[in-house]
Amino acid sequence: MDILLTAEGRARPFDRYRQLREIAPVHKTAQSPMWFLTRYADCEAVLHDPRFGKPDPSGGAGGVSGATASLSSAFTRHGLVFLNPPDHTRLRALVSGVFAVRRVDALRARIEEITDTLVADIGEVLEVDAMDALALPLPITVIGELLGVPAQDRNQFRTVVRDVTAAMEVGVAPEEIASAAAAMRDMESYFLELVARRRREPADDLVSMLTRSADDGLLDIEELVGTLILLFSAGFETTTNLIGNGLNTFLDHPEAWALLQQRPDLVGAAVEEILRFESPIQVGSRMALEPAEIDSRRVEQGEMAVLFLGAANRDPLRFADPDVFDIQREPKPSLAFSGGVHYCLGAHLGRLEGRVVFERLLRSFAGMHRVGEGPRWRGSLVLHGLEELPVRFERR
Ligand code: HEM
């Protein structure tokens, strides 16, 4: 099980996924039974089955490791991603309008503007860590503006969110759980304070909008703060990894970048292929809320299903030649944004940011090359991305 336990296994899990899928696609672990699913059809079926849901937020084992539950306070546990219907349905309805396709498309000009500034800065020096110069600052600025987190406050969250998400991993060390819990408390007090400020001085942003809804009795303070923390962290960690993983994949496949230079109309398809090929979230989980079946095998109430989304996205029964990066492959949805009631709320926004970045890079630079020893992976599995990606861009 070195997919879960070694840094190398977590960073490049794909061979291990294949072995697991070939030997035991529906694998039941011996202790505290968990079901490891690596086929597309089984993961998709669980995501759409109402007998599976999130563990009870009031306690018990949460997530793959249980660490998420042990570190999280009442606030974080009430973010909508941790809830089941009907609370989930009510909370999701309150925020879903902001992430609707039409509303997000209206952000395109601003996303282009932010990207252009970052790309112009890269143009000055040409050799950069692309994570630091582009993949991190773009999504954090976009979600920060949408929520109404002031610009000067945003950078502190780079490390805070990282500390929090480190504890979502499997087999985390106790000191990581402790620093995640401290980081979580920092986020909670920050957002509680921001809510109080926006209550006094409302602005045209999501924090003000949701604070109004809370004052109207549509959600409680724990759900409000939990959802703000969730939106903020989900809004940039994942998109950062879409951009970073995408650039890294193009550096490995210069022929695909050359094709995109000739056919910029393929940029949307390229983003879908990156999402499938190097999915920014590799693992999801659900608990059986009542007895159920997976692939005709009985699952008892309370047992967890670990959904290897990154494995499902490379399942040959779903995608022909799944280990080939092909931006012209037959379009078919992947599970990169999960599925069912928790399907990613920010999917359209994440895709749009990805498209704009690659469009702008194609337009601004003649080419890009790897420098140094190659990329440094974060060594985490759930959030699949790079620590550092040194790149040299070539002027036009
Ligand atoms: C490429 C970028 C992104 C990827 C790959 C991604 C992936 C995912 C996945 C896999 C889930 C499902 C979790 C589950 O099933 O338990 C999810 C949920 C969610 N995502 Fe994203 N995400 C991305 C960008 C964003 C952005 C930009 C936002 C904006 C705020 C966002 C907000 C959310 C929220 C709020 C949920 C919870 C939805 C619910 O539980 O109903 N995501 N995302």
Image (tube, grey):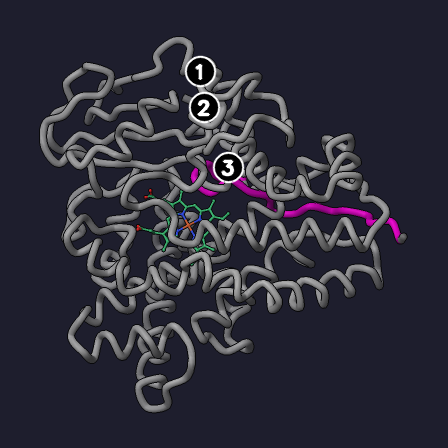
Q: Is residue 50 left or right of residue 269?
A: left
Q: Is mark 3 within 8 Å of ligand 1?
A: yes
What is the secondary structure assignment of the residue under circle 2? helix
Q: Residue furthest right?
A: 396
Q: Please determine whether, in this image, residue 231 is positioned above or below residue 13.
A: below
Q: Which residue is mark 2?
A: 2
On residue 317, the disc is 1
Distance, label 1 to label 3, CA atoms, is 18 Å
The local secondary structure at tag 1 comes to loop
- Residue 363 located left or right of residue 267: right
Magenta stretch in the rendered image:
379-395
Locate the N terminus and report the quarter of the image it occupies: top left
Residue 150 x %, y %? 50, 78
Q: Is residue 312 magenta?
A: no
| 64 to 312, vertically: above or below | below
- What residue sits right under mark 3 in the picture? 279
